[in-house]
């Protein structure tokens, strides 16, 4: 199945060998963290600021692929500390809520783990279905 790399100038260029996101077979795949377009970590020590930046990055990438947050089917949330869950969830509702999406919310799971950069507190690993918009 052919795939296509997705890049947005509003998100940091990867320093490791990977795309910012990719699409294949109508599906969109991305993992986002709280970095600005220059790769600087945003909101050090502030889970709300980091969540907002990481989800804004996700929004930019899914839009660059021709979709929207309404197309997100699955969200895997990685937190460095589960005590940050409430703050993350508060901001998550700004991007994914029944007020904006009705019952069309994505499924999700949350786990704890360490991040590649010690300043990061959260990472979102996402799958969306774009259908024909995600075809290569």
Image (cartoon, rainbow, N blue to C red):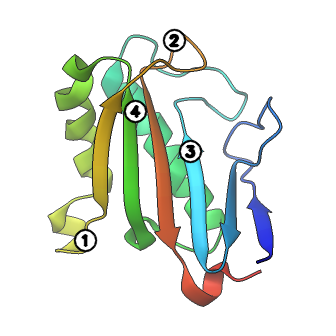
| Mark positioned earlier in the residue sequence (4 or 1) | 4
Residue 41 rendering spot, x and y as whole percentages: 58, 20
Residue 52 rendering spot, x and y as whole percentages: 40, 37
Residue at image position (33%, 54%) is 95
Instruction: Assess whether mark 1 and mark 3 are in contact (beta carbons under 8 angstroms).
Output: no
In front: label 2 or label 1: 2
| Mark positioned earlier in the residue sequence (3 or 2) | 3
- The residue at which mark 4 appears reads as 78
- The residue at which mark 1 appears reads as 101
Real-space Cα distance between discs 2 and 1? 32 Å
Real-space Cα distance between discs 3 and 1? 21 Å
Residue at image position (41%, 22%) is 113
Residue at image position (25%, 74%) is 104
Quick one: 33 or 59, which is closer to the camera? 33
Left or right of residue 131: residue 82: left
Left or right of residue 45: residue 103: left
- The residue at which mark 2 appears reads as 119
| Mark positioned earlier in the residue sequence (2 or 1) | 1
Q: Quadrant of residue 134?
A: bottom right
Real-space Cα distance between discs 3 and 2? 17 Å
At label 3, counting other C-alpha atoms closer than 10 Å, the crowd grade (few under 14, some 14-19, many 20 or more) is many
Q: Quadrant of the C terminus?
A: bottom right
Instruction: Assess whether mark 2 and mark 3 are in contact (beta carbons under 8 angstroms).
Output: no
Label 4 element class: strand
- The residue at which mark 3 appears reads as 31
In front: label 3 or label 1: 3
Label 1 element class: helix
Q: Is residue 51 above or below residue 117?
A: below
Residue 123 rendering spot, x and y as whole percentages: 47, 34
Real-space Cα distance between discs 4 and 1? 23 Å
Determine the residue located farthest toward the bottom in the rendered image: 132
């Amino acid at each position: 199945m052919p795939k296509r790399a997705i890049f947005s100038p509003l998100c940091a260029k990867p320093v490791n060998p990977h795309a910012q996101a990719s699409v294949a077979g109508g599906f969109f795949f991305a993992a986002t963290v709280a970095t600005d377009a220059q790769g600087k970590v945003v909101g050090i020590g502030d889970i709300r600021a980091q969540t907002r930046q990481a989800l804004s990055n996700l929004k930019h990438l899914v839009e660059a692929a021709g979709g929207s947050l309404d197309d997100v089917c699955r969200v895997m949330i990685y937190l460095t500390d589960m005590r940050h869950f409430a703050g993350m969830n508060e901001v998550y509702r700004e991007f994914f809520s029944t007020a904006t999406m009705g019952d069309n919310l994505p499924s999700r799971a949350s786990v704890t783990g360490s991040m590649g950069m010690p300043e990061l507190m959260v990472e979102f690993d996402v799958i969306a279905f774009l259908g024909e918009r995600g075809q290569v």
